[in-house]
Image (cartoon, rainbow, N blue to C red):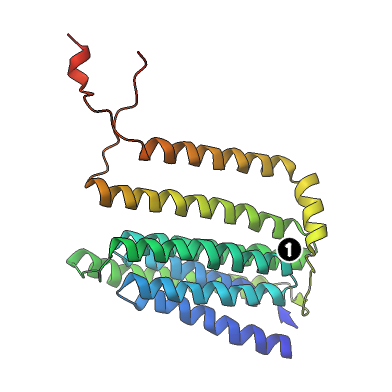
Amino acid sequence: MVPVSYYLILSGILFFCGVIGFLIKRNLITIFMSIELMLNGVNLSFVAFAAQWGHLSGQIFVFFVMVVAKLTVFLEQLENDLFELRGDLRIQPGRRHG
Amino acid sequence: MLHLVLFLVFGAICVAGAINLLAQRHPISSALSLVVVMASLAVEYLLLGAEFVAAVQVIVYAGAVMVLFVFVIMLLNAGEEEQTKGSRVALILGVPGVLTGGLLVAWVLIRHSGEKALGLGALPGYPKVIGGLLFHDFLLPFEVTSILVLIAILGAVFLASKPEAASTPTGKER
Protein backbone atom coordinates (compact mmCIF):
# COMPACT_ATOMS: atom_id res chain seq x y z
CA MET A 1 0.00 0.00 0.00
CA VAL A 2 1.56 3.22 -1.18
CA PRO A 3 0.17 6.58 -0.06
CA VAL A 4 -0.99 8.91 -2.80
CA SER A 5 1.47 11.56 -1.69
CA TYR A 6 4.37 9.31 -2.70
CA TYR A 7 3.11 9.30 -6.28
CA LEU A 8 2.59 13.04 -6.13
CA ILE A 9 6.09 13.60 -4.82
CA LEU A 10 7.52 11.49 -7.64
CA SER A 11 5.47 13.50 -10.10
CA GLY A 12 6.72 16.70 -8.51
CA ILE A 13 10.33 15.57 -8.71
CA LEU A 14 9.94 14.83 -12.41
CA PHE A 15 8.22 18.16 -12.99
CA PHE A 16 10.91 20.13 -11.22
CA CYS A 17 13.65 18.27 -13.03
CA GLY A 18 11.92 19.36 -16.20
CA VAL A 19 11.82 22.96 -15.01
CA ILE A 20 15.53 22.88 -14.13
CA GLY A 21 16.31 21.42 -17.54
CA PHE A 22 14.25 24.11 -19.20
CA LEU A 23 16.26 26.77 -17.39
CA ILE A 24 19.79 25.50 -17.66
CA LYS A 25 19.96 23.87 -21.06
CA ARG A 26 21.19 25.71 -24.11
CA ASN A 27 20.27 23.28 -26.85
CA LEU A 28 16.74 23.80 -28.15
CA ILE A 29 16.11 20.08 -28.56
CA THR A 30 17.07 19.41 -24.94
CA ILE A 31 14.76 22.20 -23.82
CA PHE A 32 11.90 20.51 -25.63
CA MET A 33 12.84 17.22 -24.01
CA SER A 34 12.56 18.81 -20.58
CA ILE A 35 9.12 20.05 -21.58
CA GLU A 36 8.25 16.43 -22.30
CA LEU A 37 9.59 15.51 -18.88
CA MET A 38 7.33 18.08 -17.26
CA LEU A 39 4.32 16.75 -19.15
CA ASN A 40 5.11 13.21 -18.04
CA GLY A 41 5.26 14.31 -14.43
CA VAL A 42 1.85 15.89 -14.81
CA ASN A 43 0.50 12.70 -16.39
CA LEU A 44 1.59 10.71 -13.37
CA SER A 45 -0.22 13.22 -11.18
CA PHE A 46 -3.39 12.76 -13.19
CA VAL A 47 -3.32 8.98 -12.93
CA ALA A 48 -2.54 9.08 -9.20
CA PHE A 49 -5.46 11.40 -8.53
CA ALA A 50 -7.71 9.24 -10.70
CA ALA A 51 -6.80 6.28 -8.52
CA GLN A 52 -7.35 8.27 -5.36
CA TRP A 53 -10.84 9.44 -6.23
CA GLY A 54 -11.88 6.37 -8.17
CA HIS A 55 -12.68 8.44 -11.25
CA LEU A 56 -11.42 7.35 -14.63
CA SER A 57 -11.46 10.90 -15.99
CA GLY A 58 -7.89 11.37 -14.84
CA GLN A 59 -6.73 8.60 -17.11
CA ILE A 60 -8.74 10.04 -20.01
CA PHE A 61 -7.11 13.40 -19.55
CA VAL A 62 -3.72 11.76 -19.90
CA PHE A 63 -4.63 11.03 -23.51
CA PHE A 64 -5.36 14.64 -24.22
CA VAL A 65 -2.07 15.69 -22.67
CA MET A 66 -0.33 13.14 -24.83
CA VAL A 67 -1.99 14.45 -27.97
CA VAL A 68 -0.97 18.01 -27.21
CA ALA A 69 2.57 16.93 -26.36
CA LYS A 70 2.82 15.00 -29.58
CA LEU A 71 1.68 18.01 -31.60
CA THR A 72 4.15 20.25 -29.77
CA VAL A 73 6.96 17.87 -30.58
CA PHE A 74 5.88 17.55 -34.18
CA LEU A 75 5.82 21.28 -34.79
CA GLU A 76 9.07 21.86 -32.93
CA GLN A 77 10.87 19.27 -35.01
CA LEU A 78 9.42 20.68 -38.18
CA GLU A 79 10.75 24.05 -37.15
CA ASN A 80 14.18 22.55 -36.42
CA ASP A 81 14.30 20.84 -39.80
CA LEU A 82 13.26 23.99 -41.62
CA PHE A 83 15.81 26.00 -39.74
CA GLU A 84 18.55 23.62 -40.75
CA LEU A 85 17.43 23.46 -44.34
CA ARG A 86 16.77 27.10 -44.92
CA GLY A 87 19.30 28.72 -42.65
CA ASP A 88 16.78 31.00 -41.05
CA LEU A 89 13.29 30.93 -39.70
CA ARG A 90 11.85 33.72 -41.73
CA ILE A 91 8.34 32.79 -42.70
CA GLN A 92 7.78 33.47 -46.34
CA PRO A 93 4.84 35.64 -47.23
CA GLY A 94 1.78 33.67 -48.15
CA ARG A 95 0.57 33.12 -51.61
CA ARG A 96 -1.38 36.05 -52.87
CA HIS A 97 -4.51 35.50 -54.81
CA GLY A 98 -4.43 36.67 -58.35
CA MET B 1 4.93 -4.47 0.54
CA LEU B 2 5.58 -5.58 -3.00
CA HIS B 3 3.76 -2.51 -4.23
CA LEU B 4 6.01 -0.25 -2.19
CA VAL B 5 9.17 -2.02 -3.34
CA LEU B 6 8.17 -1.86 -7.00
CA PHE B 7 7.14 1.78 -6.66
CA LEU B 8 10.45 2.72 -5.06
CA VAL B 9 12.56 0.79 -7.55
CA PHE B 10 10.90 2.24 -10.63
CA GLY B 11 10.58 5.64 -9.01
CA ALA B 12 14.32 5.61 -8.42
CA ILE B 13 14.89 4.67 -12.06
CA CYS B 14 12.61 7.55 -13.11
CA VAL B 15 14.45 10.09 -11.01
CA ALA B 16 17.84 8.75 -12.07
CA GLY B 17 16.81 9.11 -15.71
CA ALA B 18 15.56 12.64 -15.13
CA ILE B 19 18.77 13.70 -13.39
CA ASN B 20 20.80 12.05 -16.12
CA LEU B 21 18.88 14.06 -18.68
CA LEU B 22 20.00 17.21 -16.89
CA ALA B 23 23.55 16.08 -16.34
CA GLN B 24 24.38 14.88 -19.85
CA ARG B 25 25.90 17.31 -22.25
CA HIS B 26 25.10 15.63 -25.53
CA PRO B 27 21.41 15.72 -26.48
CA ILE B 28 21.37 12.10 -27.65
CA SER B 29 22.26 10.91 -24.15
CA SER B 30 19.49 13.10 -22.76
CA ALA B 31 17.05 11.60 -25.26
CA LEU B 32 17.97 8.06 -24.28
CA SER B 33 17.60 8.78 -20.58
CA LEU B 34 14.21 10.33 -21.32
CA VAL B 35 13.22 7.00 -22.91
CA VAL B 36 14.21 5.34 -19.63
CA VAL B 37 12.02 7.80 -17.72
CA MET B 38 9.04 7.10 -19.94
CA ALA B 39 9.41 3.34 -19.71
CA SER B 40 9.61 3.40 -15.91
CA LEU B 41 6.64 5.76 -15.81
CA ALA B 42 4.70 3.15 -17.78
CA VAL B 43 5.46 0.68 -15.00
CA GLU B 44 4.26 3.21 -12.44
CA TYR B 45 1.01 3.53 -14.35
CA LEU B 46 0.66 -0.25 -14.29
CA LEU B 47 1.13 -0.20 -10.53
CA LEU B 48 -1.83 2.15 -10.32
CA GLY B 49 -3.90 -0.12 -12.51
CA ALA B 50 -3.94 2.11 -15.56
CA GLU B 51 -3.09 -0.61 -18.03
CA PHE B 52 -4.34 1.11 -21.15
CA VAL B 53 -2.58 4.33 -20.27
CA ALA B 54 0.63 2.38 -19.69
CA ALA B 55 0.38 0.71 -23.09
CA VAL B 56 -0.34 4.02 -24.81
CA GLN B 57 2.56 5.61 -22.93
CA VAL B 58 4.97 3.04 -24.31
CA ILE B 59 3.53 3.14 -27.81
CA VAL B 60 3.04 6.88 -28.22
CA TYR B 61 5.63 8.48 -25.98
CA ALA B 62 8.51 6.04 -26.00
CA GLY B 63 7.68 4.67 -29.41
CA ALA B 64 6.77 7.74 -31.44
CA VAL B 65 7.75 10.94 -29.66
CA MET B 66 11.17 9.82 -28.52
CA VAL B 67 11.91 8.11 -31.81
CA LEU B 68 11.23 11.41 -33.54
CA PHE B 69 13.48 13.19 -31.08
CA VAL B 70 16.27 10.75 -31.80
CA PHE B 71 15.67 11.17 -35.54
CA VAL B 72 15.94 14.93 -35.29
CA ILE B 73 19.06 14.82 -33.14
CA MET B 74 20.80 12.41 -35.46
CA LEU B 75 19.61 14.15 -38.60
CA LEU B 76 20.69 17.59 -37.51
CA ASN B 77 23.99 16.41 -35.98
CA ALA B 78 23.34 18.30 -32.78
CA GLY B 79 26.65 18.47 -31.04
CA GLU B 80 27.57 18.86 -27.42
CA GLU B 81 26.29 22.02 -25.98
CA GLU B 82 28.65 24.74 -24.91
CA GLN B 83 28.75 26.25 -21.43
CA THR B 84 28.48 29.99 -21.59
CA LYS B 85 28.49 32.51 -18.81
CA GLY B 86 24.72 32.90 -18.91
CA SER B 87 24.14 29.21 -18.51
CA ARG B 88 26.44 29.12 -15.49
CA VAL B 89 24.42 31.88 -13.89
CA ALA B 90 21.20 30.01 -14.62
CA LEU B 91 22.76 26.92 -13.10
CA ILE B 92 23.86 28.62 -9.90
CA LEU B 93 20.72 30.62 -9.38
CA GLY B 94 18.09 28.44 -10.97
CA VAL B 95 18.81 25.02 -9.56
CA PRO B 96 18.67 25.98 -5.85
CA GLY B 97 15.59 28.10 -6.50
CA VAL B 98 13.73 25.31 -8.22
CA LEU B 99 14.89 22.83 -5.59
CA THR B 100 13.54 25.11 -2.89
CA GLY B 101 10.22 25.34 -4.66
CA GLY B 102 10.15 21.59 -5.10
CA LEU B 103 10.93 20.89 -1.46
CA LEU B 104 8.20 23.31 -0.44
CA VAL B 105 5.67 21.53 -2.62
CA ALA B 106 6.79 18.15 -1.29
CA TRP B 107 6.47 19.35 2.30
CA VAL B 108 2.96 20.70 1.71
CA LEU B 109 1.98 17.43 0.04
CA ILE B 110 3.24 15.34 2.92
CA ARG B 111 1.60 17.50 5.53
CA HIS B 112 -1.79 17.66 3.88
CA SER B 113 -2.01 14.16 2.53
CA GLY B 114 -5.10 12.39 3.75
CA GLU B 115 -3.37 9.11 4.53
CA LYS B 116 -5.18 7.50 1.62
CA ALA B 117 -3.11 4.54 0.57
CA LEU B 118 -3.50 2.94 -2.82
CA GLY B 119 -3.32 -0.77 -3.34
CA LEU B 120 -1.73 -2.53 -6.25
CA GLY B 121 -3.80 -1.83 -9.34
CA ALA B 122 -6.00 0.65 -7.51
CA LEU B 123 -8.15 1.85 -10.40
CA PRO B 124 -8.28 -0.62 -13.27
CA GLY B 125 -8.49 1.23 -16.53
CA TYR B 126 -9.79 -1.32 -18.98
CA PRO B 127 -9.79 -0.22 -22.64
CA LYS B 128 -13.53 -0.88 -22.90
CA VAL B 129 -14.39 1.43 -20.04
CA ILE B 130 -11.96 4.09 -21.19
CA GLY B 131 -13.33 3.89 -24.70
CA GLY B 132 -16.84 4.28 -23.37
CA LEU B 133 -15.85 7.35 -21.38
CA LEU B 134 -13.83 8.83 -24.20
CA PHE B 135 -16.61 8.60 -26.74
CA HIS B 136 -19.53 9.43 -24.48
CA ASP B 137 -18.56 11.86 -21.75
CA PHE B 138 -15.44 13.25 -23.34
CA LEU B 139 -16.63 13.42 -26.90
CA LEU B 140 -16.33 17.19 -27.15
CA PRO B 141 -12.68 17.35 -26.02
CA PHE B 142 -11.96 14.46 -28.34
CA GLU B 143 -13.35 16.30 -31.34
CA VAL B 144 -11.62 19.49 -30.29
CA THR B 145 -8.28 17.69 -30.22
CA SER B 146 -8.92 16.43 -33.71
CA ILE B 147 -9.41 20.05 -34.80
CA LEU B 148 -6.17 20.86 -32.99
CA VAL B 149 -4.40 18.21 -35.03
CA LEU B 150 -5.89 19.74 -38.16
CA ILE B 151 -4.55 23.15 -37.18
CA ALA B 152 -1.12 21.65 -36.60
CA ILE B 153 -1.17 20.03 -40.02
CA LEU B 154 -2.22 23.30 -41.64
CA GLY B 155 0.57 25.11 -39.87
CA ALA B 156 3.08 22.49 -40.94
CA VAL B 157 1.96 22.65 -44.56
CA PHE B 158 2.19 26.42 -44.56
CA LEU B 159 5.59 26.52 -42.87
CA ALA B 160 7.06 23.93 -45.16
CA SER B 161 5.64 25.32 -48.37
CA LYS B 162 8.07 26.62 -50.92
CA PRO B 163 8.42 30.37 -51.02
CA GLU B 164 7.18 32.16 -54.07
CA ALA B 165 9.85 32.68 -56.68
CA ALA B 166 9.63 36.42 -57.20
CA SER B 167 7.44 37.68 -54.44
CA THR B 168 8.77 41.01 -53.31
CA PRO B 169 6.49 43.29 -51.36
CA THR B 170 7.57 46.39 -53.20
CA GLY B 171 6.38 45.15 -56.55
CA LYS B 172 2.74 45.68 -55.70
CA GLU B 173 3.06 49.17 -54.42
CA ARG B 174 3.77 50.78 -57.73
The quarter in which the C terminus of chain B is drawn is: top left
Q: Is residue A60 visible?
A: yes
Question: Residue, x 29% and y 71% (percent of image)?
Answer: B91
Question: Dot 1, how many residues are within 10 Å of its Cα: few (below 14), some (14-19), or many (20+)?
Answer: many
Counting from the top left corner in percent of width and height, residue A94 is at 34, 26
User: Is label 1 in a helix, a strand or a loop?
Assistant: helix
Q: Is residue B145 left or right of residue A73?
A: right
Counting from the top left corner in percent of width and height, residue B7 is at 65, 83
Front position in the image: A60 or B62: B62
Q: Is residue B107 visible?
A: no
Chain bearing mark 1: A
Question: Residue, x 21% and y 70% (percent of image)?
Answer: B83
Question: Residue, x 49% and y 40% (percent of image)?
Answer: B153
Residue under pointer 1:
A50
Front position in the image: A53 or A79: A79
* Farthest-out residue, top: B174
Question: Residue, x 71% and y 56% (percent of image)?
Answer: A60
Q: Is residue B119 left or right of residue A34?
A: right
Counting from the top left corner in percent of width and height, residue A26 is at 28, 63
In the image, what residue type sits under mark 1?
Answer: Ala
Above or below, B33 relative to B144: below
